[in-house]
Image (cartoon, grey):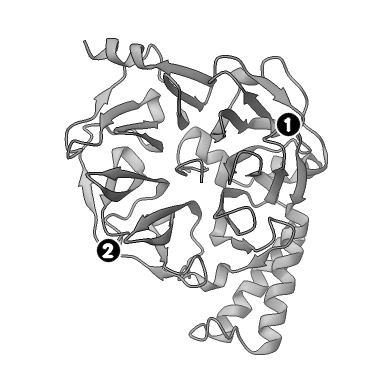
Amino acid sequence: MLRAKTTGQRACRYLFLLLITVTPFSFAMVDRIDTASLISYRASDGLLLDVAKAGERLVAVGDQGRVLISDDQGKQWRQVQSPVSVLLTAVFFSDVKHGWAVGHDGVLIHTKDAGETWVKQLDGRQLNALQFKTYQALVDAGGDPLAQDLPVDELEFYLEDAALAEEEGPTQPLLDVFFINNQQGFLLGSYGSFLKTEDGGEHWSVLSHRLPNPDRFHLNALSLVSQDSRQVLIIAGEAGLLFRSNDLGESWVALDSPYEGSFFGLSSFEQQGQSQLLALGLRGHLFTSGNTGDSWQQIELHSSSSLTSASAYGNELMLVGLGGLVLHTSVNDDLVGSFKSFEQHDRRAWSSVVRVGDGWVVVGEKGIKRISDKALEASYE
């Protein structure tokens, strides 16, 4: 895995409201899932919601289906053609070649050449039909044998929602994408949408009902953390939702949440030889866990800005968020009170951060910014 996933991504900020709000405009522009993105010379200055690494290449996604790539550590960017023109909310690469991006109207696009070319694998029309077919079959069968505690009448509610979604059209956004390898992957979205693939995204299984999420809260982020030679998957979402899978997504349990606000991102890092999980939330709420979510410690940031993304590299950790928030620290510290703020001239919202050779690249409300290590050091003097 080439990237510590945080999304995302993908929420309460101006950027994130776009991810979870369904409007008449969105419905009216449903043909955007069939319309290729327009190439714009100003694409790098527009709204971008996520950035990921494909080997040494950077790939960023955002508004109007735009996909941008950089081969010089974020100094220069070029836009490539995307098969859709909806807002793209998250991008993930499982290796240097294979990547996926998700977005509004249930869109999933895929690349096999490090982001040069993309094809659509899924859209909201197909997603709605798949959900209806899945829940009709489960209701007819009298339940799901892998979710025996779920009563049939609850599955009937899922079926009713699926029928309504088909009537409304492809309006529900996907908010995160995560792949364990080139074949096994997951999609997360609004209203508890959760899907799994075993063939690289060609076919998907609807598993929303297998999560203990009866209120259908939005699912915002999924991350993998290693613990005692085990690989553990964690999902975070709205209203403090936290789920964990110890069997690579076959089954999930709800975790006790350290707060009731929404989580917008997850990330992991190594501290003193032990894997640590980070959960990023509203108004500066940051939590860390060294036992895959069994217990959490809150990290006081002395900031009320909502957190959107984190990235770890070596002994460094960078956080970004709303209001121009950029925080940096060494993970050799205990983290408590150790974050330093990188001062900026504006308060543009940042949505994702990734490490490059001699610094960091952040993307957000007004495009892309490159922060060099020298600039970080100078801001602390």
Classify residue 281 as left or right of residue 299.
Answer: right
Mark 2: amino acid = Asp
Q: Residue at x 28, y 54 (%)?
A: 259
Residue 93 percent across, percent down from the top left: 59, 42
Q: Judge by depth and name the residue closer to the eye, 264 or 273.
A: 273
Query: Is residue 260 rendered to the left or right of residue 31?
Result: left
Q: Amino acid at mark 1?
A: Glu
Q: Nearer the viewer, residue 21 or 180?
A: 180
Q: Position of residue 319 (x, y in %)?
A: 35, 33
Query: 10 Å neighbourhood of mark 2: few (<14), some, or many (≥20)?
Result: few
Give me the residue at 60% from left, 75% from top: 157
Q: Is residue 77 above or below residue 5?
A: above
Measured in 3D between alpha carbons, the distance from the residue under mark 1 to the one under mark 2, in whole angstroms, is 41 Å
Name the residue: 73% across, 54% down. 124
Secondary structure of residue under mark 2: loop
Q: Is residue 366 above or below residue 134?
A: above
Read off the residue under disc 2.
Answer: 294
Instruction: Write down the quadrant of residue 309 in the picture.
Output: top left
Residue identifier under label 1: 116
* Residue 6, image x, y percentages: 45, 43
Q: Which one is closest to the eye, mark 1 or mark 2?
A: 1
